[in-house]
Image (tube, helix red, strand yellow):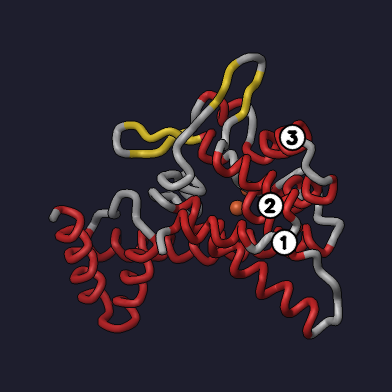
Amino acid sequence: MTKTQRLESIIKLIKNRKLRGKVTEIVSNPQIEIAGTVYTGLSLEDSPAGLTRHHSYPGGFTEHVIATAEISMKLCDVTEKIYGGHVDRDLVLAGVVLHDIFKPLTYKFERESYSTTILGERVDHLTLVTAELIRRGFPFELIHIVCAHHGGQAGPMWPRTVEALICHLADSADSQLNGEVLRAARYLSRRATGEELPLLRSKEAFEIVNSKKAEGWQGVRKTVGKIRRNRAS
Ligand SMILES: [Fe+2]
Ligand SMILES: [Fe+2]
Protein backbone atom coordinates (compact mmCIF):
# COMPACT_ATOMS: atom_id res chain seq x y z
CA MET A 1 0.00 0.00 0.00
CA THR A 2 1.40 3.44 -0.89
CA LYS A 3 1.53 6.19 1.73
CA THR A 4 -1.29 8.03 -0.02
CA GLN A 5 -3.47 4.90 0.10
CA ARG A 6 -2.68 4.52 3.80
CA LEU A 7 -3.71 8.12 4.38
CA GLU A 8 -6.98 7.44 2.52
CA SER A 9 -7.60 4.34 4.63
CA ILE A 10 -7.20 6.44 7.81
CA ILE A 11 -9.81 8.91 6.51
CA LYS A 12 -12.15 5.96 5.79
CA LEU A 13 -12.07 5.08 9.52
CA ILE A 14 -14.02 8.29 10.26
CA LYS A 15 -17.55 6.94 10.77
CA ASN A 16 -19.49 10.21 10.57
CA ARG A 17 -20.22 10.65 6.86
CA LYS A 18 -20.49 14.41 6.91
CA LEU A 19 -17.19 14.84 8.76
CA ARG A 20 -15.46 12.26 6.54
CA GLY A 21 -16.69 14.13 3.46
CA LYS A 22 -15.38 17.45 4.73
CA VAL A 23 -11.98 15.94 5.61
CA THR A 24 -11.74 14.29 2.17
CA GLU A 25 -12.57 17.60 0.51
CA ILE A 26 -9.73 19.50 2.16
CA VAL A 27 -7.20 16.66 1.79
CA SER A 28 -7.92 16.35 -1.93
CA ASN A 29 -7.71 20.12 -2.39
CA PRO A 30 -5.33 21.55 0.23
CA GLN A 31 -5.24 25.20 -0.73
CA ILE A 32 -6.16 28.49 0.83
CA GLU A 33 -7.31 31.80 -0.63
CA ILE A 34 -6.19 35.00 1.06
CA ALA A 35 -7.21 38.39 -0.32
CA GLY A 36 -7.85 36.97 -3.78
CA THR A 37 -4.62 34.98 -4.02
CA VAL A 38 -4.84 31.18 -4.01
CA TYR A 39 -1.87 29.53 -2.29
CA THR A 40 -0.93 25.99 -3.22
CA GLY A 41 2.28 24.33 -2.14
CA LEU A 42 4.08 21.04 -2.44
CA SER A 43 1.88 17.97 -2.95
CA LEU A 44 0.99 16.11 0.25
CA GLU A 45 2.83 13.09 -1.13
CA ASP A 46 6.13 14.92 -1.77
CA SER A 47 6.12 17.31 1.15
CA PRO A 48 8.19 17.03 4.32
CA ALA A 49 6.49 17.69 7.68
CA GLY A 50 9.32 19.91 8.92
CA LEU A 51 12.32 21.79 7.54
CA THR A 52 14.90 20.40 9.97
CA ARG A 53 13.50 19.11 13.25
CA HIS A 54 11.46 16.10 12.12
CA HIS A 55 10.24 14.35 8.94
CA SER A 56 12.41 16.75 6.89
CA TYR A 57 12.51 14.68 3.69
CA PRO A 58 10.22 13.92 0.72
CA GLY A 59 7.21 11.90 1.90
CA GLY A 60 7.77 13.02 5.49
CA PHE A 61 4.36 14.69 5.68
CA THR A 62 2.30 11.55 4.95
CA GLU A 63 4.64 9.44 7.09
CA HIS A 64 4.06 11.82 10.03
CA VAL A 65 0.26 11.76 9.64
CA ILE A 66 0.16 7.94 9.34
CA ALA A 67 2.40 7.44 12.39
CA THR A 68 0.51 10.05 14.43
CA ALA A 69 -2.80 8.35 13.57
CA GLU A 70 -1.44 4.97 14.72
CA ILE A 71 -0.16 6.42 18.00
CA SER A 72 -3.40 8.31 18.60
CA MET A 73 -5.50 5.15 18.18
CA LYS A 74 -3.28 3.35 20.73
CA LEU A 75 -3.80 6.27 23.13
CA CYS A 76 -7.58 5.99 22.59
CA ASP A 77 -7.35 2.27 23.49
CA VAL A 78 -5.43 3.03 26.71
CA THR A 79 -7.81 5.85 27.63
CA GLU A 80 -10.84 3.58 27.25
CA LYS A 81 -9.50 0.18 28.32
CA ILE A 82 -7.27 1.20 31.22
CA TYR A 83 -8.78 4.46 32.46
CA GLY A 84 -12.41 3.89 31.54
CA GLY A 85 -12.58 7.23 29.72
CA HIS A 86 -14.54 7.92 26.56
CA VAL A 87 -13.01 9.23 23.36
CA ASP A 88 -14.68 10.43 20.16
CA ARG A 89 -12.39 8.65 17.70
CA ASP A 90 -13.88 10.42 14.69
CA LEU A 91 -12.71 13.74 16.11
CA VAL A 92 -9.26 12.34 16.93
CA LEU A 93 -8.80 10.88 13.43
CA ALA A 94 -10.01 14.03 11.70
CA GLY A 95 -7.79 16.14 13.97
CA VAL A 96 -4.71 14.04 13.23
CA VAL A 97 -5.31 14.07 9.47
CA LEU A 98 -5.86 17.84 9.38
CA HIS A 99 -3.53 19.15 12.09
CA ASP A 100 -0.63 19.94 9.71
CA ILE A 101 -2.57 19.88 6.43
CA PHE A 102 -1.30 23.33 5.35
CA LYS A 103 2.35 22.69 6.16
CA PRO A 104 2.99 21.74 2.51
CA LEU A 105 1.71 25.20 1.55
CA THR A 106 4.48 26.77 3.59
CA TYR A 107 7.37 24.82 1.98
CA LYS A 108 9.17 25.02 -1.34
CA PHE A 109 11.95 22.87 -2.78
CA GLU A 110 14.80 24.81 -4.40
CA ARG A 111 18.46 23.98 -5.07
CA GLU A 112 18.13 20.53 -3.52
CA SER A 113 16.74 21.75 -0.19
CA TYR A 114 13.51 22.87 1.47
CA SER A 115 12.77 26.41 2.56
CA THR A 116 9.78 28.53 3.54
CA THR A 117 7.40 30.11 1.02
CA ILE A 118 6.31 33.74 1.36
CA LEU A 119 3.04 32.42 2.84
CA GLY A 120 4.90 30.41 5.49
CA GLU A 121 7.11 33.38 6.31
CA ARG A 122 4.07 35.48 7.20
CA VAL A 123 1.51 33.03 8.65
CA ASP A 124 2.22 29.75 10.46
CA HIS A 125 0.55 26.48 9.44
CA LEU A 126 -1.48 26.22 12.64
CA THR A 127 -3.11 29.63 12.14
CA LEU A 128 -3.73 28.91 8.45
CA VAL A 129 -5.50 25.60 9.09
CA THR A 130 -7.50 26.93 12.06
CA ALA A 131 -8.77 29.85 9.96
CA GLU A 132 -9.63 27.62 6.98
CA LEU A 133 -11.49 25.06 9.13
CA ILE A 134 -13.60 27.87 10.58
CA ARG A 135 -14.27 29.20 7.05
CA ARG A 136 -15.25 25.71 5.80
CA GLY A 137 -17.65 25.15 8.71
CA PHE A 138 -15.84 22.32 10.52
CA PRO A 139 -17.14 21.29 13.96
CA PHE A 140 -16.16 23.53 16.88
CA GLU A 141 -14.50 20.68 18.81
CA LEU A 142 -12.33 19.78 15.80
CA ILE A 143 -11.19 23.39 15.49
CA HIS A 144 -10.08 23.25 19.13
CA ILE A 145 -8.07 20.05 18.45
CA VAL A 146 -6.20 21.68 15.58
CA CYS A 147 -5.74 24.95 17.45
CA ALA A 148 -4.27 23.16 20.50
CA HIS A 149 -2.12 20.55 18.76
CA HIS A 150 1.20 22.28 19.61
CA GLY A 151 0.20 22.66 23.26
CA GLY A 152 0.42 25.87 25.28
CA GLN A 153 4.21 26.18 25.26
CA ALA A 154 4.78 26.10 21.49
CA GLY A 155 1.25 27.11 20.41
CA PRO A 156 -1.62 29.39 21.34
CA MET A 157 -3.31 27.10 23.90
CA TRP A 158 -3.24 23.86 25.85
CA PRO A 159 -5.65 21.02 24.93
CA ARG A 160 -8.88 21.30 26.92
CA THR A 161 -10.57 18.07 25.78
CA VAL A 162 -9.43 14.44 25.88
CA GLU A 163 -9.50 14.30 22.06
CA ALA A 164 -7.30 17.39 21.77
CA LEU A 165 -4.91 16.01 24.41
CA ILE A 166 -4.57 12.71 22.52
CA CYS A 167 -3.82 14.51 19.23
CA HIS A 168 -1.26 16.75 20.93
CA LEU A 169 0.48 13.82 22.65
CA ALA A 170 0.49 11.65 19.51
CA ASP A 171 1.84 14.52 17.38
CA SER A 172 4.53 15.32 19.89
CA ALA A 173 5.53 11.64 20.38
CA ASP A 174 5.91 11.03 16.65
CA SER A 175 7.76 14.30 16.03
CA GLN A 176 10.21 13.41 18.79
CA LEU A 177 10.63 9.77 17.78
CA ASN A 178 11.41 10.72 14.20
CA GLY A 179 13.36 13.90 15.02
CA GLU A 180 15.64 12.33 17.63
CA VAL A 181 16.58 9.44 15.33
CA LEU A 182 17.28 11.83 12.43
CA ARG A 183 19.43 13.97 14.71
CA ALA A 184 21.37 10.96 16.02
CA ALA A 185 21.92 9.58 12.52
CA ARG A 186 23.17 12.96 11.23
CA TYR A 187 25.60 13.16 14.14
CA LEU A 188 26.83 9.57 13.65
CA SER A 189 27.27 10.11 9.92
CA ARG A 190 29.18 13.36 10.49
CA ARG A 191 31.45 11.80 13.13
CA ALA A 192 32.13 8.67 11.09
CA THR A 193 32.52 10.14 7.59
CA GLY A 194 32.89 13.90 8.06
CA GLU A 195 29.66 14.48 6.11
CA GLU A 196 25.90 14.33 6.51
CA LEU A 197 23.57 12.77 3.97
CA PRO A 198 21.26 15.43 2.52
CA LEU A 199 17.50 14.91 3.01
CA LEU A 200 18.09 11.92 5.27
CA ARG A 201 15.01 9.64 5.26
CA SER A 202 13.65 7.91 8.38
CA LYS A 203 14.47 4.43 7.07
CA GLU A 204 18.08 5.46 6.39
CA ALA A 205 18.37 7.13 9.79
CA PHE A 206 17.14 4.03 11.63
CA GLU A 207 19.61 1.93 9.61
CA ILE A 208 22.52 4.19 10.60
CA VAL A 209 21.55 4.19 14.29
CA ASN A 210 21.16 0.40 14.30
CA SER A 211 24.50 -0.10 12.54
CA LYS A 212 26.26 1.83 15.34
CA LYS A 213 24.67 -0.47 17.91
CA ALA A 214 25.60 -3.60 15.93
CA GLU A 215 29.07 -2.79 14.56
CA GLY A 216 30.25 0.52 16.05
CA TRP A 217 31.78 3.30 13.93
CA GLN A 218 32.87 0.82 11.25
CA GLY A 219 29.19 -0.15 10.88
CA VAL A 220 28.18 3.49 10.50
CA ARG A 221 30.79 4.06 7.74
CA LYS A 222 29.59 0.92 5.94
CA THR A 223 25.92 1.88 6.17
CA VAL A 224 26.47 5.48 5.07
CA GLY A 225 28.52 4.19 2.10
CA LYS A 226 25.77 1.75 1.18
CA ILE A 227 23.10 4.49 1.34
CA ARG A 228 25.26 6.73 -0.90
CA ARG A 229 25.65 3.93 -3.48
CA ASN A 230 21.91 3.16 -3.38
CA ARG A 231 21.10 6.81 -3.94
CA ALA A 232 23.53 7.09 -6.85
CA SER A 233 22.23 4.00 -8.66
FE1 LIG B 1 1.82 21.43 13.64
FE1 LIG C 1 2.42 17.38 13.39
Give the residue at x 53% y 34%.
105
Mark 1, ligand 2, within 8 Å: the answer is no
Report the mark closest to the observer, 3 or 2.
Answer: 2
Is residue 208 visible in the rendered structure shown here?
yes
- Of the pair 208 and 233, the residue shown nearer to us: 233
Under circle 3, the secondary element is loop
Give the residue at x 69% y 54%.
94
Q: Pinpoint residue 3: horizontal percent, then vertical percent.
A: 44, 58
Tell me the amino acid under the disc marked 2.
Answer: Arg
Give the residue at x 49% y 32%.
41
Residue where numbered disc 2 is placed: 20
Q: Pinpoint residue 178: horizontal percent, then vertical percent.
A: 49, 63
Q: Pinpoint residue 129: horizontal percent, then vertical percent.
A: 68, 38
Tell me the amino acid under the disc marked 1.
Answer: Lys
CA–CA distance between discs 3 and 1?
20 Å
Under circle 1, the secondary element is loop
Residue where numbered disc 1 is placed: 15
Decide: few, some or many residues near mark 2? Use Cα within 10 Å; few <14, some 14-19, many ≥20.
some
Image marks 2 and 1: residues in contact by CB distance under 8 Å: yes
Decide: few, some or many residues near mark 1? Use Cα within 10 Å; few <14, some 14-19, many ≥20.
few
CA–CA distance between discs 2 and 1?
7 Å
Give the residue at x 76% y 45%.
147
First reached walking from the N terminus: tag 3 or tag 1: 1
Query: Considering only vertical position in the picture, is 155 above or below 63?
Result: above
- Residue 193 sits in which quadrant? bottom left
Decide: few, some or many residues near mark 3? Use Cα within 10 Å; few <14, some 14-19, many ≥20.
few
Residue where numbered disc 3 is placed: 136
